[in-house]
Image (spheres, rainbow, N blue to C red):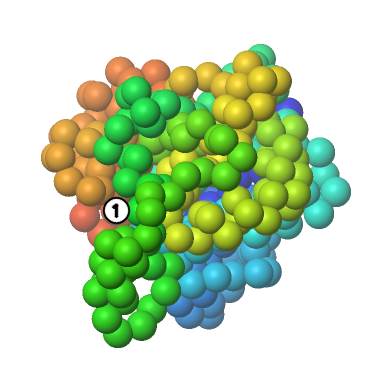
Amino acid sequence: MNIAHLILAHNQPGQLKRLISRLAHPDADVYIHLDAKTEMQPFEHLAKLPNVFFIKDRVKVYWGSFNIVQATINGFQQIIRSGRQYGYVNLLSGQDYPLKPAALIHQFLADNPGKAYMNALVAETHWMEALPRVQEYHLNNYQFPGKFMVQKAINKLMPQRKLPNGLVLVGRSQWFTISGECVAFILDYWDKHPALRRFMKLTWAPDEFIFQTILYNNADYKARMVADDLRYIDWSGGGVSPKTLTMEDAAALEASGKLFARKFDEMKDSAVMDHIDKHPA
């Protein structure tokens, strides 16, 4: 089972190297999209590691912006253009870390081919707080003075927006593990629907729903979706970002049964990653 790990990163080259090493496997390639706002030089040595490739078409990523989707699309396209057949594409951040050894991850996915492991709540019934993300105009992908005043004026004057093509909005989390066939379908759909591409540029945090929405609205690919993103993430803090995991979370990580977890920060607590290496979940 060949796996392409696509990592969206923007800092901490040392922690990124550790993640790459943990993912290393004869049947794994690692593709890294480094935020275009980040200087490349401190990361260049990582390209010398076996089976590691940097995404050539880098974009500047801002929190909640469409460009996170564009970075992912650029990564998907380079993976497909590589010509290698991947059973799965695994989307990670630079602050993720595998809870299980690479061999067990590959075995699990080989035993469950063709799936799409991702959170996909239907917004109108189970994720209603997401509806304003598409119903209103959002200018967070653009950087200019007074943009929020302009955004407010636009939403006051313009009618409520609707997803093109009658799409049902689903999603919840940006991170997922999906089959190579799912990636190919997403890229084909994206290429053939320019109205959707234009629409997404004016939404908020579309990375948390666009890929799930594309798959969910096709009967064949909807049937492949599994309501489990294979990740342990602690949102107990109630903020806009998950908890940074430390040694106090070690027991929960071991008991989770998940393949991956986020988020980690080696500057805050590297011991928890040492513990995972010695005591895989």
- What residue is at 65 percent from the left and 63 percent from the top? 55
Q: Is residue 187 visible?
A: no
Helix, strand or loop status at disc 1: loop
Camera-nearest residue between 271 and 152: 152
Camera-nearest residue between 219 and 211: 219
**Vertical position of residue 85 compared to residue 65: above or below:** above
**Vertical position of residue 260 compared to residue 241: above or below:** above
Residue 197 rendering spot, x and y as whole percentages? 60, 56
The image quadrant of residue 112 is: top right
Q: Residue at label 1?
A: 265
**Vertical position of residue 167 compared to residue 139: above or below:** above
Most extreme residue toward the right is 83
Where the C terminus falls, by quadrant?
top left
**Vertical position of residue 162 compared to residue 55: above or below:** above
The tally of labels here is: 1
- What residue is at 64 percent from the left and 64 percent from the top? 54
Where the N terminus falls, by quadrant?
top right
